[in-house]
């Protein structure tokens, strides 16, 4: 009996995502095109206390040998990561507080550092380029098997931002941060007052059996969408967002490039069509089949950078104290729900950022390496209309 899951989450939340590819192994928008997943994720019916987004059990055995990666990828480098907000939902019984441009996206540049040896738990540190060291997040890369999904994706009440304990918003007294964190576990309801699930999450399926993928699963945190962070279109400014965020690291053969930066067409495509990509069964994830396929075509693995696909999202709370938005008729702060697809591109490899990572680990300030400018300004996101 196998377990097919999207990003396992507490029923109320989840993460929307970008699928690794569609036709011919090329990258594509996962929300477009026919669904190829054999089983959809459904919320659990048991434990109302944890309400973990459980997986739908299916019978059968689907042993596969292609695309298997036995150890965590080495993800050190400079990354451009985009959150494209593609789904907005409201409670049918209350006004939807979210307005303005849609879809829209925020893009951050992250410096990611990771020890290549003596790192059995696959920890890495990620920091928005140029931001304060206190905003650095420490995360683990795990094999995204069903057990890991269930254990990591149960809803966990938090008062932390993405960096964890250094961003305890309640202790820091951040303006308008709600003392009651029950809002993190809200889900949009339909006209019959039934809880609904975001399409973005249910579309993002992970393999129920080997080969698994690797990544950071269900990072749950809060952040304020404000101009100080170069976020916050005026329609969202001041609102508090709860995220349930998953990053999956993989290689797609269509990202392989020659020395001049041109795509290598001979490897871009599905393995069955002469390329080097495979689609993981019962998902829409497309990734490099194996290094041997590249070697047979004279392509070095170093020519194929890592990429990120993922999902995030959840409630957006317009606290009266932070946004001056009047409370609703039932006394709650105004709210809505938004969900995003995540894509990331590795701009510089591990060696190119090694000096910065060494200085960061020694407590020194991080600067642009080799005279190059940081990819984004201090503070964080660059909002850009989609």
Image (tube, rainbow, N blue to C red):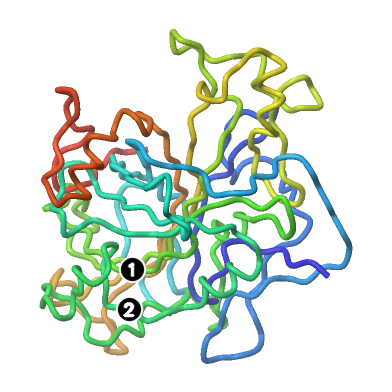
Mark 2 or mark 1, earlier in chain? 2
Closest to the observer: 278 or 18?
Answer: 278
What secondary structure is marked by label 2?
A: loop
Closest to the observer: 34 or 96?
Answer: 34
* Residue position for label 2: 158
For the point 32% across and 36% down, which residue is it?
A: 78
Circle 2 residues within 10 Å: few <14, some 14–19, many ≥20? some
Mark number displayed over residue 191: none
What secondary structure is marked by label 1?
A: strand
Percent coordinates x, y for residue 252 in the rendering: 59, 32
For the point 51% across and 71% down, which residue is it?
A: 152
Q: Is residue 220 left or right of residue 108?
A: right
For the point 42% across and 44% down, which residue is it?
A: 116
Percent coordinates x, y for residue 225 in the rendering: 22, 59
- Confirm or deny contact between disc 2 and disc 1 (CB under 8 A): yes
Q: Residue furthest top?
A: 260
For the point 15% across and 41% down, which residue is it?
A: 366
Mark number displayed over residue 221: 1
Q: Is residue 111 left or right of residue 156?
A: left
Compared to residue 298, the image places residue 233 above or below, namely: below
Q: Quadrant of residue 68?
A: top right
Q: Residue furthest right?
A: 60
């Amino acid at each position: 009996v196998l377990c097919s899951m999207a990003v396992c989450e507490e029923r109320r939340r989840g993460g929307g995502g970008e699928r690794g590819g569609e036709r011919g192994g090329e990258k594509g928008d996962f929300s477009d095109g026919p669904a190829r997943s054999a089983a959809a994720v459904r919320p659990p019916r048991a434990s109302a206390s944890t309400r973990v987004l459980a997986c739908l059990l299916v019978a059968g055995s689907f042993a596969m040998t292609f695309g298997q990666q036995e150890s965590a990828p080495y993800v050190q480098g400079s990354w451009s990561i985009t959150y494209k907000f593609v789904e907005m939902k409201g409670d049918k019984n209350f006004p939807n507080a979210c307005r303005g441009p849609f879809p829209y996206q925020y893009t951050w540049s992250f410096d990611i550092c990771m020890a290549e040896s003596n790192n059995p738990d696959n920890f890495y540190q990620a920091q928005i380029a140029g931001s304060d060291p206190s905003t650095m997040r420490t995360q683990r890369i795990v094999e995204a098997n069903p057990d890991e999904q269930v254990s990591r994706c149960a809803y966990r009440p938090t008062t932390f931002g993405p960096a964890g304990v250094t961003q305890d918003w309640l202790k820091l007294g951040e303006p308008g941060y709600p003392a009651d964190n029950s809002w993190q576990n809200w889900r949009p309801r339909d006209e019959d007052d039934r809880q609904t699930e975001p399409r973005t999450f249910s579309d993002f399926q992970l393999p129920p059996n080997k080969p698994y993928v690797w990544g950071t699963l269900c990072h749950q945190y809060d952040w304020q969408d404000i101009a100080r962070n170069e976020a916050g279109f005026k329609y969202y400014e001041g609102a508090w967002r709860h995220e349930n965020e998953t990053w999956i690291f993989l290689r797609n053969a269509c990202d392989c490039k020659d020395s001049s930066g041109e795509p290598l067409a001979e490897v871009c495509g599905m393995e069955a069509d002469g390329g080097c990509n495979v689609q993981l069964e019962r998902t829409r994830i497309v990734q490099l089949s194996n290094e041997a396929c590249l070697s047979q075509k004279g392509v070095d693995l170093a020519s194929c950078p890592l990429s990120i696909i993922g999902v995030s999202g959840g409630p957006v709370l317009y606290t009266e104290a932070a946004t001056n938005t009047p409370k609703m008729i039932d006394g709650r702060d105004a709210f809505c729900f938004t969900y995003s697809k995540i894509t990331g591109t590795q701009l510089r490899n591990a060696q190119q950022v090694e000096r910065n990572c060494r200085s960061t680990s020694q407590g020194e300030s991080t600067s642009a390496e080799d005279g190059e400018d940081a990819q984004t300004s201090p503070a964080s996101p660059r909002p850009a209309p989609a």
